[in-house]
Image (tube, rainbow, N blue to C red):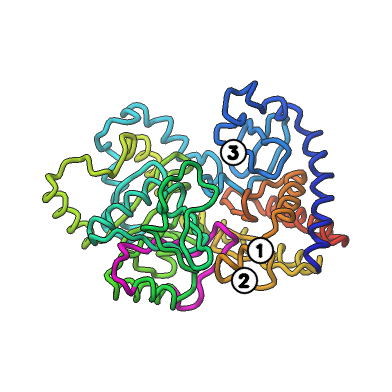
């Protein structure tokens, strides 16, 4: 089916669905705006306006896999805060930890009685022997990069084109005509980020070998599966080559599991036997509470001890913030690792994801669309391409903001919230079979409308 025809139908669908959205949400409409809220752009974070809706949905309640908006509309959530609530909104053990945490002080700048248990759980679950805490994955990535530079004595960082590592300045680059440049939409960026960051295509072993040949890269920061510009899986053998080439160049390998923790217990690293020097996780690891973790090998830990002694060992190292490692974070981490992020939870998530993947593929085929469904564990992505994409350039060529907006808005009006900025569906253990089947039926309805065909019942 020609892209131009599909986008024309999508534009018509957006117009009709926007009217449906407005009619159902007068309270959300009234609640939005700078004049009434006091917020810049009328929202707590300006990017909340980037959802493909006429105005932001205002959430009144969230529990399990369901949201209720200010107008009483019930919505099945397969966005889940773009992974922050991957195990469902308000898991009971985390709510219990929140209720009890205050008796030990929410933050004291000292370890709480949960610290030893959390340390052991992190080592057992994710493999690396030494860990530290942050507030967000962006923080954790910053700290890990700083350590990599300290222990290698090198300044440069390598990332993959199209990467997502939060708000870390060094990673906010694009590969344009073979050059690494600062992303054009960055606000207040005054330094050329290409001076110390090298960006190359994902899955390009030759480009990786060439970039590492100068022996000046402190670390490669990589998602095991790229997840932010359409899902891009690693080519067979790419991770083995990544580890081999970084070892040969004396470059550290930093794996960011913040999204790919959806793979299974222990994340993509544990499931697929990767061997990083450093690892970062954020978003869902505390059950939705702001906390992140970053781990390192014993060799890096030993070297870091030496460096700290040489530099007086004072705590002002540029790593850590006052609220990092708080009693509140430790309590929620312990609850999540022990009782929420379990083998049984992942089993349920994978089973529901199997069901959704099969249903989405059937709906795409029935509508005659040349799309694919990519997947990493409980995380699925609808890609507007007839074959899996191999790098960011292919992902960008396949993308369509217009079709994406029509899909998202139509699905929302049918009661299902997808992730903005791309076509991600995340399956929580709270999602029932009935809700999973409803999601598939809604997807079939929308793809049928886009293709002007009657969707199967």
* Observer-nearest of 328 and 23: 23
Question: Which dot, 1 or 3, sits closer to the camera?
Answer: 1
102 magenta-colored: no
Residue 126 percent location from the top left of the image: 36, 59
**Residue receiving disc 2:** 388
Residue at image position (34%, 64%) is 253
Secondary element at tag 1: strand
Residue 456 shows in the view: no
Lower sequence index among marks 1 and 2:
1
Residue 333 percent location from the top left of the image: 39, 44
Mark number displayed over residue 63: 3
Lower sequence index among marks 1 and 3:
3
Mark number displayed over residue 383: 1
Residue at image position (35%, 75%) is 245
User: Which range is magenta?
Assistant: 213-238
Mark number displayed over residue 303: none
219 magenta-colored: yes
Question: Which dot, 3 or 2, sits closer to the camera?
Answer: 2
Q: Tell me how many marks there are.
A: 3
């Amino acid at each position: 089916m020609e892209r131009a025809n599909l986008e024309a139908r999508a534009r018509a669908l957006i117009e009709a669905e926007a009217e449906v959205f407005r009619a159902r949400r007068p309270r959300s409409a009234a609640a939005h705006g700078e004049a009434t809220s006091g917020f810049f752009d009328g929202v707590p974070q300006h990017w909340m306006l980037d959802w493909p809706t006429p105005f932001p949905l205002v959430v009144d309640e969230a529990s399990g896999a369901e949201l209720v908006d200010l107008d009483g509309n019930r919505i099945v959530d397969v966005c889940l805060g773009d992974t922050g609530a991957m195990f469902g909104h308000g898991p009971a053990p985390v709510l219990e930890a929140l209720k009890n945490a205050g008796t030990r002080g929410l933050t004291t700048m000292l370890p709480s009685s949960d610290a030893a248990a959390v340390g052991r759980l992190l080592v057992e679950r994710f493999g690396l022997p030494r860990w530290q805490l942050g507030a967000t994955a962006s923080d954790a990535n910053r700290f890990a990069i700083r350590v990599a530079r300290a222990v290698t004595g090198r300044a440069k960082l390598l990332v993959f084109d199209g990467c997502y590592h939060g708000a870390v300045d060094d990673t906010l680059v694009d590969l344009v005509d073979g050059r690494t440049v600062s992303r054009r939409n960055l606000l207040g960026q005054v330094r050329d980020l290409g001076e110390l960051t090298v960006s190359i295509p994902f899955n390009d072993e030759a480009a990786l070998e060439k970039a590492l040949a100068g022996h000046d890269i402190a670390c490669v920061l990589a998602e095991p599966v790229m997840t932010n510009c359409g899902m891009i899986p690693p080519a067979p053998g790419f991770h083995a080559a990544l580890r081999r080439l970084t070892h040969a160049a004396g470059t550290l390998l930093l794996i960011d599991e913040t999204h790919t923790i959806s793979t299974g217990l222990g994340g993509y690293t544990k499931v697929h036997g990767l061997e990083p020097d450093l690892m970062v996780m954020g978003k869902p690891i505390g059950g939705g509470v702001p906390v992140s973790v970053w781990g390192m090998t014993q060799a890096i830990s030993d070297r870091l001890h030496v460096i700290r002694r040489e530099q007086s060992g004072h705590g002002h190292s540029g790593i850590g913030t006052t609220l990092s490692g708080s009693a509140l974070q430790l309590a929620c981490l312990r609850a999540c690792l022990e009782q929420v992020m379990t083998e049984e939870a992942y089993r349920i998530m994978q089973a529901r994801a199997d069901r959704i993947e099969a249903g989405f593929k059937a709906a795409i085929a029935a509508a005659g669309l040349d799309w694919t469904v990519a997947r990493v564990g409980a995380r699925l992505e609808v890609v507007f391409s007839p074959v899996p994409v191999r790098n960011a350039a292919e992902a960008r060529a396949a993308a369509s903001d217009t079709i994406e907006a029509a899909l998202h808005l139509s699905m929302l009006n049918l009661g299902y919230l997808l992730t903005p900025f791309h076509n991600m569906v995340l399956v929580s253990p709270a999602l029932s079979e009935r809700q999973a089947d409803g999601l598939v039926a809604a997807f079939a309805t929308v793809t049928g409308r886009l293709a002007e065909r009657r969707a199967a019942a």
